[in-house]
């Protein structure tokens, strides 16, 4: 197998599918082949019946350091950037947001540029106490891309997002946790095991209902109230038809904890 084909690894750990950047010698900087593999990995995980949660992680000292700029050269044509976003980066974002299963970004090292953006596109984020987020784009006089200007203000507010994207350097674990950028901070020693345990908690949720909630939140974010409420009614009827709802009701009346199957 060609080396480039192994730059994104797929690992199944119980009900959790790990998608792992595996180019540590280059801080997991993204290539065309990696982006294509990443989109395919999310699409496949979304369809796989044995997958109930997804973890996005990176090998080595970086989670992911953004685009491999050496592949673009020192003076690429301006149109190159927009074309690359349309062909490679934006399909990955759509695959992530359309995936009905919970996605956890396990940020064990530096997440810079588009690497930070990909972490923001996940449903949940955890980081190690040695990791950091680095927006990076303004140092190249580029606007933040790969959805950063969409996701970051929604997570931390407009003012803080603007500051980070223009003036910010490294956003460490304390600040990330305090501002709600991440949900948990775990010690670097044992970080992968802690991330797996968190993902197993997500995998134990009613998977179909989670997918409906994900769609409802995205709809409610932009829709008028009436339209959002109509969508809520439709999805609630669909959720009530799931096996997990029946399990939840049975457990409620039996005064026990429900065990969900994802169906």
Image (cartoon, rainbow, N blue to C red):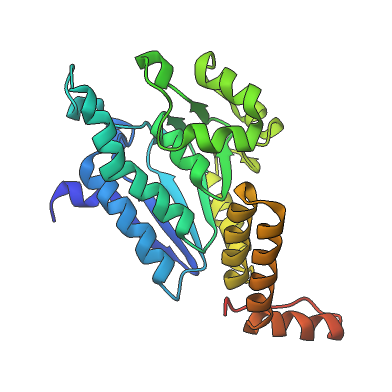
* Quadrant of the frame with the C terminus: bottom right
Percent position (x, y) of residue 243? Answer: 63, 84
Percent position (x, y) of residue 134? Answer: 48, 24
Residue 181 seen in the figure: no
Residue 256 seen in the figure: yes
In percent of the image, x 71 and y 85: which residue is there?
246
Residue 183, above or below 11: above
Of 204 and 48, the residue lying toward us: 48
In percent of the image, x 34 and y 49: which residue is there?
91
In percent of the image, x 37 and y 42: which residue is there?
59
Residue 7, above or below 204: above
Q: Along the horizontal axis of the image, is 142 left or right of 219?
A: left
In percent of the image, x 53 and y 51: which residue is there?
104
Percent position (x, y) of residue 74? Answer: 18, 17
Percent position (x, y) of residue 20? Answer: 37, 49
* Quadrant of the frame with the N terminus: bottom left
Of 161 and 133, the residue lying toward us: 161
């Amino acid at each position: 197998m060609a080396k480039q084909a192994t730059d994104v690894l797929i690992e199944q750990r119980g009900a959790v599918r790990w998608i792992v950047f595996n180019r540590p010698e280059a801080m997991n900087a993204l290539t065309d082949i990696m982006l294509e593999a990443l989109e395919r990995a999310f699409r496949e995980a979304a369809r796989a019946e044995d997958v109930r949660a997804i973890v996005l992680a990176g090998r080595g000292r970086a989670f992911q350091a953004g685009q491999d700029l050496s592949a673009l050269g020192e003076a690429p044509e301006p149109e190159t950037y927009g074309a690359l976003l349309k062909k490679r980066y934006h399909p990955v974002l759509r695959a992530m947001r359309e995936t009905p299963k919970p996605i956890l970004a396990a940020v064990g090292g530096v997440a810079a540029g588009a690497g930070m953006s990909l972490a923001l596109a996940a449903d949940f984020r955890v980081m190690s106490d040695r990791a950091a987020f680095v927006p990076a784009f303004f140092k190249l006089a580029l606007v933040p891309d790969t959805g950063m200007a969409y996701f970051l203000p929604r997570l931390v507010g407009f003012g803080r997002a603007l500051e980070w994207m223009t003036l910010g350097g490294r956003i460490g674990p304390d600040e990330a946790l305090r501002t709600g950028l991440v949900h948990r901070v775990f010690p670097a020693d044992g970080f992968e095991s802690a991330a797996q345990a968190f993902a197993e908690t997500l995998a134990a949720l009613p998977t179909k209902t989670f997918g409906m909630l994900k769609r409802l939140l995205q709809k409610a974010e932009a829709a008028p109230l009436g339209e959002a409420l109509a969508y809520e009614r439709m999805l609630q009827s669909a959720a009530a038809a799931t096996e997990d709802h029946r399990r939840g009701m049975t457990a409620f009346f039996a005064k026990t904890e429900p065990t969900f199957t994802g169906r």
